[in-house]
Image (spheres, helix red, strand yellow):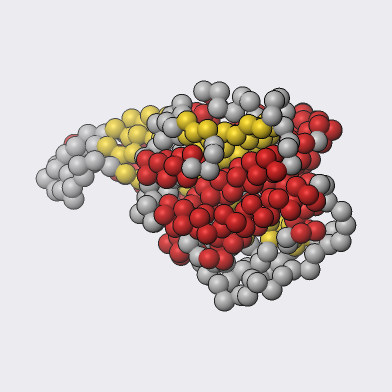
Amino acid sequence: MTIVQADVLWRPEDDYKVKPTLEEGEIYRPDILEVVDTAIDSLSDDLRELNLDIHDHPELKYEERYAHDAYTSFLQKRGFEVTRHHLLETAWVATYTHGRGGRVLGVNSEMDALPGIGHACGHNLIGISGVAVACAAKAAMEQLNIDGKVILLGTPAEEGGFGKVKLWERGAYKEMDACLMCHPAPGPIHSISLSSCLAVIRLEIEYAGHTAHAGLSPWEGKNALDAAVLAYTNIALLRQQIKPTHRVHGIIEGNNWGPSIIPDNSKMYYYIRAPTTVEAEETLKRVVPCFEAAALATGTKVKVTRGFTGNELVQNTALGDELANVVRKKYGVIDYEYGIRSASTDFGNVSHLMPGLHPGFSIPTVPEGGNHTRAFTDSARSQAAHDACLVVSKALAHVGMRVITDGEFLQQVKDAFEEQKNNRT
């Protein structure tokens, strides 16, 4: 078994067309994989056009109207039953059913971009991967006369909007036996990652003070900006005492500030991350007093509002083992060190509620050009990134077709979900 622990990340100058050494051995239903490979290869040019179109029209969370229309039009032309504005304004669903009965594969396509830096998390690639997986599953069901259903869900607002959580609450996942998606990140060449990611708790903190003339009578004021700065400093000092696997970070905002006015308001947005939800809750207990102490010291009032909690990602072990098997024997290598392991995703919540798989896949990046940088925006547009996206999509489609065709395997997936749920701390 090959496990990658590489020190060198895939760079744009590397020749990715030099194929990796693959393992020998059998895979499940080679006839399915042949159809999957052919279907995705035949769509590559169309998917590339869609990829660039989405990349060139970045939209923020819950504003993905262009992407909504582009994806739904693409899928409707290819024989899917499409529901626009599905449960949320910019969400959508595309389904294909073959035969009667059968198992149901779920797939996610993300759409949103980041403020100011566009598709710096590669959601253009995540979006077309979902399309590729769904189209490949459809082709396999048609050509091999397999009963089943694929549901491709267009999920808005991953970047801070918890779109998948809202869709879950509205029943969007209820038919699915398992759900698959993927995510680009820096990593070794030809690698697909089965790492997890961090749980996250989101906070909004508001300080209320009193204005005064900053030169004439500052003693009459209660400085809400000072409170925010002090809280920021408190947390900076706290970081020395928290585990290196935990993250606490945020920003400061305010309205109607001026240099000769004591600010009477400030607002902070903070994220607390940890490897598990339980650990994030424990760190939260240490972070909140930092905000409260700042209010006490400055004579201001503080309001701490908790937003959505994002669970850590649970990679279903049965789905992950099947993905690893097909990747090592047909496409590349598996790693457990890269992917989005120190980031967070709302798919983590989905993976706590049903069997899910969310591998990372490496794309070529420049030094200091990882996710959420302008350089990664450029990387996510490259031909090499597109090609890598289609490779992981082929592997995911094969795993998904085993969910549909192999009842014993699906039971293993469900058993793994229950076991991981029971072992969760």
Residue under the image location 48 percent in, 62 percent down: 381
- Which residue is rendered at x = 84% and y = 33% of the image? 408
Image: 398 above or below 88: below
- The image position of residue 301, as x and y in percent, is 33, 30
**How many numbered marks have been drawn onto this rendered protein structure?**
0
Residue placed farthest to the right in the image? 25
Query: Is 144 or 308 nearer to us in this picture?
Result: 144
- Horizontal arrangement in the rendering, residue 380 relative to residue 319 (left or right): left
Image height of 258 relative to 290, above or below: below
Q: Position of residue 147 (x, y in %)?
A: 72, 32
In the image: residue 201, left or right of residue 261: right
Q: Is residue 58 visible?
A: yes
Question: Which residue is located at x 21 percent, y 45 percent?
Answer: 257
- Compared to 391, does 323 lie above or below? above
Looking at the rendering, in which quadrant would you find the C terminus? top right
For the N terminus, the image quarter is: bottom right
Q: Residue furthest left?
A: 216
Question: Residue at point 74% right, 53% down?
Answer: 34
Q: Position of residue 55 (x, y in %)?
A: 43, 55
Q: Residue 51's x, y, as percent? A: 48, 55
351 to 385, vertically: above or below: above
The residue lying toward the viewer, choosing from 359 and 274, is 359
Q: Is residue 287 visible?
A: no
Residue 327, image quadrant: bottom right
